Amino acid sequence: MTIRVAVDALGGDRAPSEIVAGALDARAPGIVPVLYGPAGLDTHGLEHVVCDGAVGMDDKPAEAVRAKPGSSLVRAVRAVGDGDAQAVVSAGNTGAMLAASLLHVRRLPGVLRPGIAVLLPAAAGPSVLIDAGANADARPEHLVQFAHMGAVFAEEILEVAEPRVRLLSIGEEPEKGNQLTLEAHALLADAGLRFEGNTEGRTLLEGEADVVVCDGFTGNVALKTLEGTIGSVLDALRHEIDANVRGRLGGALIRPAARRVRARLDVDTHGGGYLLGLQGIVVIAHGASSRRATANAIRMAARGVEHDIVGRLRESLPERVVESARSTTPNGNK
């Protein structure tokens, strides 16, 4: 099976050089990265679709998608909708990726809102956080759908037979939280999932759950807090090791263990997150994606195709959830 992955060569803070380098690293038997970028881009032999301009990080998402249909981001997303690629990866404007995906890839029937699913480096193995930033505002029924989609992700990508689902809140007790989490807790308890109640931010890396559910505002704050804290701690450790002779001697002993810890915690290890709930595979990479992060994001996109995440979601979203979604909005639209 050959999987074509459309790659936005102009998306991200380190584009295009790191994006092109990452695409080269990801190229393998069965994975064909296709770069979408400007004329004259040095692709080092990778397939190249010439595009007109880019969507900037500070552009207003919906306006940019309408005003820049020939941009690298929009053209790469449209490739999935048109069947020219099986997946798309971009480290560009997240809001624009969402808007372009809704327009060109479209939602699965009954899905109210797509959610970004990212892998957290939990102690006992990766877990899934959803939504990590697609929906700053959400309703309780959205969180139920995120939970179902996250469970399918955990089953297919993490190979967890019965994913444990928890709701991110300010306390473990079911009566703690804001109105959204209180109502979502009640719905999740009756959603046919292995729902084990609330979890707190301090346990996100302990592996209490295989799937952690929240609205996109909360999830994005939690994710960036974790990433910043992990980066600061690893940098501080490196600084202390290099500060003096004793530190360097001790560092030589712990360096193998430190490397293993860094490999597990480094955000580049997974490269990005799936935008679940669409009729195609869309991976949103980190804005500061390096060569390694880009390559891993492309490999992640290919795995989503190999495991038929879209088909599994289409089959497994419970009928009552789909019917509930249809009944809450006119014609099932957002």
Image (cartoon, helix red, strand yellow):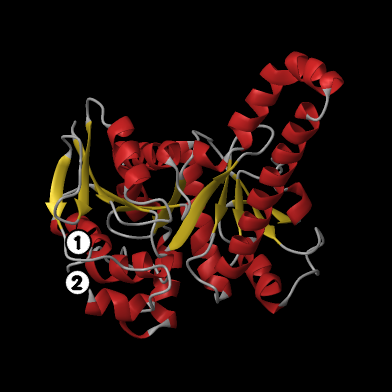
Real-space CA distance between mark 2 and mark 1, rounded to the nearest whole angstrom: 7 Å
- Residue 91 is at least partly visible in this image: yes
Q: Residue at x 33, y 31 (%)?
A: 25
Q: Residue furthest front?
A: 244
Q: Which mark is residue 138?
A: none
Amino acid under label 2?
Pro
Image quadrant occupied by the C terminus: bottom left
Q: Is residue 161 above or below residue 17?
A: above
- Residue 84 is at least partly visible in this image: no
Q: Residue at x 81, y 17 (%)?
A: 250
Q: Residue at x 25, y 63 (%)?
A: 105
Q: Mark 2–mark 1 contact, CB under 8 Å?
A: yes
Of 160 and 274, nearer the camera is 274
SS at badge 2 = loop
Give how far across and how far down residue 251 sits, in percent.
76, 20
Disc nearer the start of the sequence (2/1): 2
Amino acid under label 1?
Arg
Give how far across and how far down residue 151 sits, in percent.
51, 48
Q: Which mark is residue 75?
A: 1
Query: Which image quadrant for residue 222?
Result: bottom right
Q: Residue at x 51, y 60 (%)?
A: 146
